[in-house]
């Protein structure tokens, strides 16, 4: 009895030790990351890590919650790296978020103010002696016309009594009780700090260093009226208003924008732009139509070629084994490589295709030919898959059907067209829809083969003739000229709906959703 | 009798041969160019003229084309992703298939919905998110293999869990009921019954996941800017993209080297893969 007890005891002890070891390693790693995140002020990331840590602790430190023990890793991965990006895409699509509108409103205002510093109307200038006062980098300032001395420290400038200042032979203030001058050498090392010095003089005026020994009186041209939210430029006498799309614009001429702008929340802006703005709408509609026609044509051609092959090889045939193993090759080769190989083969001057045809055809510079290239290459890539699924489905059809039809006097052609094909279509329709959805987002074939071209950049085109929605969204988000993350996200959301809707429809048809018990 | 038989089969052979020629045309071209010492697209001709290994040597010795590094990057990323996503996916699949709990049906439907959305559709959001993570954890942020792997893991989790659930469903309930009566815990049932029984399926799912990751281009090209961190897909694209004509020979050699192991794996596992294809769409 006691022997038996010991055996079970030792069996259960080791897993426990391993479990505790793994858990403490995991917890300390995650805890450290959490600490780093909070230290860097990234409370969101820190918070997410904290939630994971707590959840893991709750789930794995007790006996119950068995399903969650199995599910938690998957849930965490899906939640952070799939669901969050999808939700974030939806959120981003509601923002004006592009080149020139990438920062927050506060950051944009800071930068606008930075451009708004101008000398006061008299161009008042100061001689400046840098030093430390009460530990802070400060300055003794002498106004060049009136020779009034000021102490600039901690953001403000105060007039100094002539009695308390030490003057040099020209009457410039160079010393003060408690003020320790800084040498030029040391000042040079403090440059970044010195550039940012501002000493307030009241009435919107302040003193700003111009070099290491001179400063001038500046005013801020912009004043923000907190009540109306209007930004007034006192130098040029222009009133700017927030246009609600991430920019301050001239009240009199809304086309005149102040830069930089900011990411502004404007939920429908990007979607409305896709429909109404001719610059965006034109290419979008073309891309949209081509995406649908490409996905449809490519699935139909691949399926037709694959099905015909399955029918051709359905009977006992010499060399059938050889045929099958060669014909599956295009499917087995990594697709990105075959696409790049085909890319070279369609080269106008030296490509193998033109050598075979004996004609210098410029495949990539003609919209129709470029589309043809994509369809041909995708046919090459995809027909083996459709052959495989078609022949699988053909073999799965009950043999009695064929016998019964033959007894009724149907020819083999009739049996194929009237009985087998309709059944086949029904069996394969979920796969056909899935393939449509896949090709709808087939980034690689377009990006690696034609890169969306031909495109007439000189005519201001932003989308090429063979761009599909996903490559168009990619270029919109990460293009070289302008990066419009907001618009790209809006396009992605539209694609989510199309692909998601299609898949849902297909699932509902095949009753998968209901059969989930 | 024989003659008519052959005539009836003639169209079958003709059609098969048309597709065979179509299929092997690029393969033939790439093999011929890989052995053409002049190396450029300009010199490659349909009929082999010269023979040399120089393109293969370039590939191994050129300091500007770290080809072997790219192959290694792709292989270990794809392998890690395959193994980890299968482990995590199998856990979830087991829970959904064998355990009964509140919210199971809703969870399954959510999983089904999530797995139909291609992860890379959210690429702008992924980019912004990983850029932010990079500022605190460079090792799992933008530009790192760690970050890319996490995105891959999230993306392949749903599909793998769904595929594996289908298989576990087909294992008879009596097996685990018997084990339960013998006092086995759910974890023991998982490790000692399901993992050994599903080993072939796990392997094929892992292989498909491996091939999928090896082929992935969008996220990798967005993530990996450093030449030495690139995957073979991004690397080959970048070096043919720059000077396609001039690099054609080494590129052809590189494609062959990178494809051969994958094609071999694929042909080896073909029977299982085809079975998986018909029961549910996996690739294509």
Image: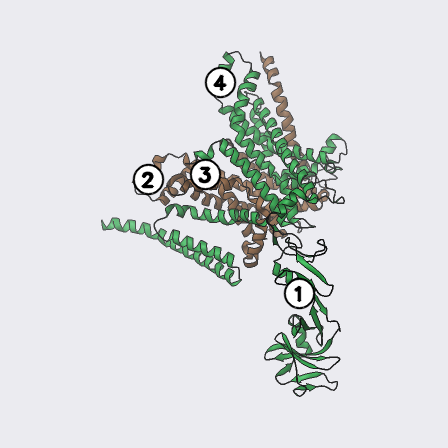
Chain colours: A green, B brown
Q: Kindly report which numbered mark, 1 or 2, lies closer to the viewer in this rendering.
A: 1
Q: Earlier in the sequence, mark 1 or mark 4?
A: 1
Host chain of mark 2: B
Cα–Cα gap, marks 4 and 3: 33 Å
The nearer-to-camera label among 4 and 2 is 4
Please name which of the two marks, 1 or 4, marks the residue nearer to the observer: 1
- Residue indicated by mark 1: A223
> Dots 4 and 3: beta carbons under 8 Å?
no
Farthest residue, direction front: A227
- State how many labels appear: 4
Quarter location, residue A321: top right
Residue picked out by circle 2: B179
In depth, the one of A373 and A54 nearer the eye is: A54
Q: Earlier in the sequence, mark 3 or mark 2?
A: 3
Tell if the residue under mark 3 belongs to the same chain as the one under mark 2. yes
Question: Against A94, is A359 above or below?
Answer: above
Residue pointed to by mark 3:
B164
Q: Secondary structure at mark 4?
A: helix
């Amino acid at each position: 009895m006691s022997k038996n007890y010991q055996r079970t005891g030792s069996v259960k002890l080791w897993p426990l030790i391993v479990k505790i070891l793994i858990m403490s390693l995991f917890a300390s790693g995650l805890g450290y990351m959490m600490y780093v995140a909070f230290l860097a002020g990234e409370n969101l990331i820190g918070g997410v890590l904290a939630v994971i840590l707590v959840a893991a602790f709750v789930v794995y430190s007790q006996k119950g919650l068995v399903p969650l023990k199995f599910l938690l890793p998957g849930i965490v991965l899906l939640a952070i790296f799939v669901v969050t990006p999808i939700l974030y895409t939806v959120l981003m699509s509601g923002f004006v978020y592009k080149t020139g509108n990438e920062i927050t409103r506060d950051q944009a205002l800071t930068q606008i103010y930075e451009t708004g510093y101008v000398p006061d109307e008299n161009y008042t200038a100061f001689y400046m002696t840098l030093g430390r006062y009460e530990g802070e980098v400060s300055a003794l300032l002498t106004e060049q016309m009136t020779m009034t001395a000021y102490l600039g420290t901690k953001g403000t400038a105060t007039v100094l009594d002539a009695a308390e200042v030490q003057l040099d032979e020209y009457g410039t203030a160079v010393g003060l009780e408690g003020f320790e001058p800084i040498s030029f050498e040391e000042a040079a090392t403090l440059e970044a700090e010195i550039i940012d010095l501002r000493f307030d003089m009241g009435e919107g005026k302040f003193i700003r260093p111009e070099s290491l020994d001179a400063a001038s009186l500046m005013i801020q041209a912009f004043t923000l009226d907190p009540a109306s939210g209007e930004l007034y430029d006192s130098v040029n006498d222009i009133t700017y208003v927030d246009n609600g799309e991430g920019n301050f614009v001239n009240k009199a001429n809304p086309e005149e924008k102040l830069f930089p702008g900011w990411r502004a929340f404007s939920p429908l802006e990007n979607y409305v732009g896709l429909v109404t703005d001719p610059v965006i709408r034109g290419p979008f509609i073309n891309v949209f139509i081509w995406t649908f026609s490409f996905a449809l044509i490519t699935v139909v051609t691949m399926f037709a070629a694959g099905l015909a092959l399955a029918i051709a090889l359905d009977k006992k045939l010499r060399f059938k084994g050889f045929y099958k193993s060669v014909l599956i090759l295009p499917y087995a080769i990594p697709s990105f490589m075959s696409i790049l190989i085909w890319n070279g083969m369609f080269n106008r001057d030296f490509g193998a295709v033109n050598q075979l045809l004996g004609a210098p055809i410029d495949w990539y510079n003609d919209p129709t030919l470029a589309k043809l290239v994509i369809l041909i290459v995708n046919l090459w890539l995809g027909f083996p898959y459709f052959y495989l699924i078609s022949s699988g489905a053909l073999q799965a059809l009950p043999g009695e059907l064929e016998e019964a039809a033959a007894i009724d006097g149907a020819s083999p052609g009739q049996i194929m067209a009237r009985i087998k094909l309709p059944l086949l279509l029904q069996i394969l329709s979920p796969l056909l829809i899935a393939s449509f959805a896949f090709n709808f987002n087939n980034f690689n074939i377009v990006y690696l083969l034609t890169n969306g071209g031909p495109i007439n950049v000189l005519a201001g085109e932003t989308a090429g003739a063979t761009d599909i929605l996903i490559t168009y969204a990619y270029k919109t988000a990460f293009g070289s000229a302008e990066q419009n993350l907001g618009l790209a996200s809006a396009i992605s959301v539209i694609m989510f709906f199309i692909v998601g809707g299609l898949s849902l429809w297909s699932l509902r048809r095949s009753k998968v959703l209901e059969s989930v018990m | 009798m024989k003659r008519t038989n052959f005539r009836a089969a003639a169209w079958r052979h003709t059609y098969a041969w048309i597709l065979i020629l179509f299929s092997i045309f690029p393969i033939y071209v790439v093999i011929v160019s890989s052995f053409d010492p002049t190396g450029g697209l300009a010199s490659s001709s349909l009929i082999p003229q010269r023979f040399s290994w120089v393109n293969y040597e370039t590939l191994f010795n050129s300091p500007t084309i770290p080809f072997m590094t790219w192959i290694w990057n792709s292989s270990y990323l794809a392998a890690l992703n395959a193994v980890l996503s299968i482990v995590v996916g199998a856990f979830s699949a087991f829970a959904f298939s064998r355990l009964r709990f509140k919210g199971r049906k809703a969870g399954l439907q959510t999983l089904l919905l999530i797995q139909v959305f291609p992860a890379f559709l959210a690429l702008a959001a992924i980019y912004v998110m990983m850029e932010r993570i990079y500022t605190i954890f460079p090792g799992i942020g933008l530009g790192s293999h760690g970050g890319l792997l996490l995105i891959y893991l999230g993306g392949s989790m749903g599909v793998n869990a769904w595929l594996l659930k289908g298989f576990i469903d087909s294992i008879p309930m009596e097996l685990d009921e018997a084990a339960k009566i013998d006092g086995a815990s759910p974890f023991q049932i998982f490790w000692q019954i399901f993992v050994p029984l599903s080993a072939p399926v796990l392997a094929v799912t892992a292989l498909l996941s491996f091939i999928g990751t090896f082929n992935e281009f969008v996220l990798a090209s967005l993530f990996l800017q450093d030449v030495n961190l690139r995957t073979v897909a991004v690397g080959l694209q970048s070096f043919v993209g720059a000077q396609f004509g001039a690099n054609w020979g080494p590129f052809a050699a590189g494609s062959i080297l990178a494809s051969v192991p994958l094609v071999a794996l694929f042909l080896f596992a073909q029977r299982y893969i085809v079975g998986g294809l018909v029961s549910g769409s996996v690739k294509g």
